[in-house]
Amino acid sequence: MSRWTELTGEASGEEYAARFAALARGGQDVHGEARFCAALVPAGARVLDAGCGTGRVMIRLAELGYDCVGVDLDASMLAVARRQAPGLPWFRVDLAEFEPALLGIAGDFDLVVAAGNIFPLLAPGTEAAVVGHLAAALRPGGLLVAGFGLDEAHLPVPPGLTLPDYDDCCAAAGLALVDRFATWDADPYDGGGYAVSVHRLQLP
């Protein structure tokens, strides 16, 4: 069972969406992840939102002209995403078992984004498998972008996955570190408790 399921019971979609809607109404910028991704690949690029949740990031990227697919295990989150953007492709799937062909979609994504503490909230021990499946969905030279917390101040669960652990998983999947930031606003990483990592799938 994933840490996310243990934490939420997969029943928090409406609450999660309401929280971000309130932030937006209060004038907060809720599109930092989408803006970050848009700076990496041109409009029209194929983007996989891995752990898409209620679709906040993917819907914004679709509005900016990206060809997007969203996958998540939490049915309550996907229900919100489908209601907000019924014309976009949303799939319920465990990232540890994700294979585009099984969903009837093409791989060869230009970019895979995993925002929202996806990796620290996976089922323990599946991190390498998830990285491997996401890397396999990328075209050669494609990018994997993941942002997640590293300490108790940035996580709703006890921290487990370290950056060296994550980099090792990426290296095993043929991904090389391109850059690392402290925020989705691309502030330089300073060794703090949150990191946004960009890895590139190496050419064969």
Image: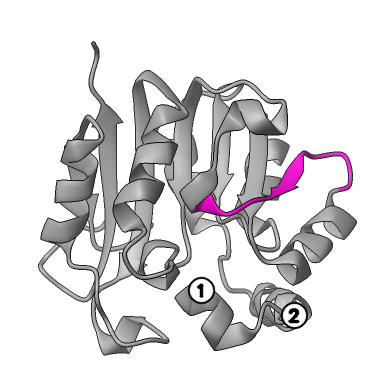
> x and y percent of residue 190 in the render?
11, 66
Q: Is residue 139 left or right of residue 22?
A: left
In the rendering, which numbered label is found on residue 1?
1
Amino acid type, mark 2: Ala
Indicate the secondary structure of the residue bearing disc 1.
loop
Amino acid type, mark 1: Met
- Assign the C terminus to one quadrant of the image: top left
Tell me: residue 146, above or below residue 67: below
Residue 66 is at least partly visible in this image: no
Q: Residue at x 24, y 69 (%)?
A: 161
Q: Residue at x 77, y 39 (%)?
A: 89
Q: Nearer the viewer, residue 181 or 16?
A: 16
Residue ranking furthest to the top:
204
The label nearer to you, 1 versus 2, is: 1
58 part of magenta stretch: no
Q: Nearer the viewer, residue 157 or 192?
A: 157
Judging by the rendered image, the residue that carries numbered circle 2 is 18
Q: Is residue 103 left or right of residue 8?
A: right
Q: Which residues are magenta?
A: 86-95
